[in-house]
Amino acid sequence: MAKGIAAKRLLMTGQVRCPVAIGAALIAVGMLRSGPAVPQNAAGTPPATLQETGLYTDQDRLQVDPAHLAFAPQYPLWSDGAAKRRWISLPPGTAIDGSNPEAWVFPVGTRFWKEFSFNGQRVETRYLERKPDGQWLYAAYAWSADGRDAQLVSARGKRGAYPLAGGRSHTIPGVTDCKACHQGGPSEVLGFGTLQLSPERDPDAPHAELQPEPHVDLGYLVDNGLLVGLPKALLDAPPRIAAATATERAALGYMHGNCGHCHNERGSLQNIGLFLRHSVTNAGEPAAMSTIKQAVKKQAPGQSPDAVLRVEPGYPDRSGVMQRISSRYPALQMPPLGTELIDDEAVRLLNRWIAEKGASIRQASANQGR
Amino acid sequence: MHRALPLMVVTAFMVPSAVPAQDGAGAQVKRGEYLVSIAGCHDCHTPWTTGSAGPEPDMKRALSGHPQDLTISAPATLSPPWSGAMNPTSTAWSGPWGVSFSANLTSDPETGVLRDFSEQQFIQTIRTGRHQGQGRPILPPMPWPAYANMTDDDLKAVFAYLRQVPPVKNKVPDPLPPKQ
């Protein structure tokens, strides 16, 4: 920085004889775009290869250990259209504590894997492991071109992992970006919770995946002693998003799975007052209440000034939510990380929801006027 | 008198105990001011001007970011090998990312960028390089990767200091995207 100041003084006085310092400084800051990550905490260093995490019993045939449970959340996170497979492993004789259904507590030694593939080609597998100190270890493994093995990715992540449309490419996120989402709410584990594993699955959920065998849901976990303490009421009446229409249910579910990990009532962004995470313990749908006819708190760079409301029923184009998810300008786009492309299916769904919401409000007004 | 004695004793102990608490807050702000001064925050967040001794930060506008009346509408036009440029106030930087304008870090309730930040969000912003810790990326040349190595206590001190920097009303423009 001192070099930068000195160079700046020379530049401003017109005495620049050696602009190398400024050039070097600018190149250096240009390189910062990928951003180094905060060093891993004391939870440990991730294994160097995916094989060492214990996902496979037979690496050559990529045979997943049958003791691991494959699962699929009902409202999956969209990641540039990647096909995903997920597994959880609990240490023998342990169980998840579900007594707080908003934030399950996982036993030490719990492991999660999520495999990302594009066009049938494995690209990365992300890994979470709960360490003895209670911290979660974060890692990502990039697959070799021949698909035979996967090596640990630098904590800074990896750009250009797979080519996507429009000259863009899939980015394997760095550890800080992983934590930006995973540490944004009541639980660091996303996609494996009460609503996501409810047997009342939403048939209209965008990007819905088939449930792999053995169909892991709340009932399966409780029946097999893998989940304890879950309030019985949630088994008797499995949670589902309360919505006026199927479209609304799917739209709110999409936001729960794709936005609610940051935008919720418990995380550090709670002062924004945008709550897109479904609560299985409280009545009402925060995602509807905090968006419909609610003012945009602060315009994002590049946002159209006509976006006064987060959701303006009947007017998707001037709803703030739509402008954010329909953009991939970094200062405006939502989600701000994890995707390079616009999720067209989600845009269509939320457009339809907002349009239908306007129509239903107009109809209700007409009925009242009769 | 005997009944009043315990109360007097308690009061005598209470008064001094309140003073260190105030000293603690004051010390934290002083620590923050020190850190801001050595971390180069004024290099970009305070507009530079040419004074009698040459270029220097205009401390009347300390930490108020890119002046709102200084309009920049497009990235710099550069030829190889150059990849970036800055403007004379050192508050606008052009590079492969587009144009970034340094933020108003003062306590102004209308235009200060930290007006909506909690202490935790400020810490997370510096740790992650993302707005409020989880949002859009902070653009170069903000050297957050270096500051990410600061301790929580140091970042709290910086935040405490910035919260009480005299307000300067100055609405910094939005960043500009790179040329297509």
Image (cartoon, coloured by chain):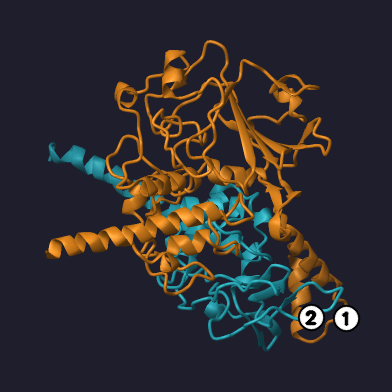
Chain colours: A orange, B cyan
Give the answer, above or below, for where A9 lies relative to A28.
below
- Which residue appears farthest toward the bottom when viewing the image? B52
**Residue at mark 1: chain:** A
Q: CA distance from mark 1 to mark 2?
A: 8 Å
Which label belongs to residue A17?
1
User: Residue flagged by tag 2: what amino acid is it?
Assistant: Leu
Give, as a three-letter code, the residue at label 1. Arg
Q: Judge the density around disc 1: few (<14), some (14-19), many (≥20) Cα neighbours within 10 Å.
A: few
- Residue located at (67% from left, 38% from top): A116
Task: Find disc 2 in the rendering and name its residue.
Answer: A10
Which image quarter is the C terminus of chain B in?
bottom right
**Rendering quarter of residue A52:** top right
User: Which residue is found at the position 41% from the left and 24% from the top?
Assistant: A98
Q: Residue furthest top?
A: A93
Where is residue B72 shown, x and y percent of the image?
62, 83
The vertical placement of A289 against A186, above or below, is below
In the rendered structure, which disc, 1 or 2, sits on the residue that comes first in sequence? 2
User: With respect to residue A86, does B173 lie above or below?
Assistant: below
Secondary structure of the residue carrying numbered label 2: helix
The quadrant in which the N terminus of chain B is found is: top left
Residue B135 falls in image quadrant: bottom right
A314 with respect to B165 (left or right): left
- Spot occupied by residue A40 in the image (x, y as percentages of width and height): 66, 38
- Residue A273 appears in the rendering: yes
Q: Residue A139: image x %, image y %?
A: 67, 35
Choose between A167 and A32: the one closer to the eye.
A167
Q: Residue at x 37, y 22 (%)?
A: A230
Whether residues under marks 1 and 2 lie with C-beta atoms below 8 angstroms apart, the answer is yes
Residue at image x 84%, y 35%? A146
Residue B76 position in % (x across, y down): 73, 80
